[in-house]
Amino acid sequence: SITIFENINAIKGFAKKANDDELILEMELLQLHYYTFRKKFSKKFTVDKIKSLYEISKRKNILWLEIRTQSLLANYLYHYHQEYASNKLKTNTLYQIHQ
């Protein structure tokens, strides 16, 4: 755990120096994957973290991140909590098309 987060934080540091905001967000997404696979984090904690990154992606209009956070949440709820039709992000469809 410590090594994973040290590596993620190192990449975030490089990304910050390079003004690469999307890489920073991608590292946030990588952390979320860790949270979903480790059962020591509560469902509320994990869902809230995913929703937070989703909201950032919506606000910054980063379509790839919107899709990946929606997919991560759907897979997490389906595989770990047997929630098949939950719509925690309150979107109309899983993959929205931007105009």
Image (cartoon, helix red, strand yellow):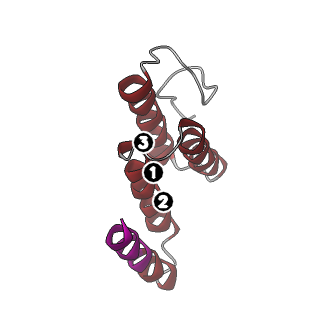
- Between 43 and 63, the residue placed more toward the observer is 43
Give me the disc on residue 4: none
Q: Which residues are magenta?
A: 1-11
Residue lying at 32% horizontally and 73% vertically, measured from the top left: 3
Q: Residues within 10 Å of mark 1 (few under 14, many from 20)?
A: many
Q: Are marks 2 and 1 in contact (CB under 8 Å)?
A: yes
Residue lying at 44% horizontally and 15% vertically, measured from the top left: 84
User: Does residue 40 sit above or below 12 in this rendering?
Assistant: above
Mark 2 → mark 1, Cα distance in angstroms: 6 Å
Q: Earlier in the sequence, mark 3 or mark 1?
A: 1
Give me the disc on residue 68: 3
Q: Secondary structure beneath disc 2? A: helix
Instruction: Name which residue type carries label 3.
Output: Arg
Q: Secondary structure beneath disc 1? A: helix
Q: Are marks 3 and 1 in contact (CB under 8 Å)?
A: no
Residue for badge 1: 32
Q: Residue furthest top?
A: 85
Q: Image check: 26 left or right of 55?
A: left
Q: What x and y, as percent, mark residue 28? A: 48, 59
Q: What x and y, as percent, mark residue 77? A: 45, 27
Which one is in front in this view, the residue at disc 3 or the one at disc 2? 2
Instruction: Name which residue type carries label 1.
Output: Leu
Residue lying at 51% horizontally and 30% vertically, measured from the top left: 97
Q: Image check: 77 left or right of 60?
A: left
Mark 3 → mark 1, Cα distance in angstroms: 11 Å
Residue for badge 2: 28
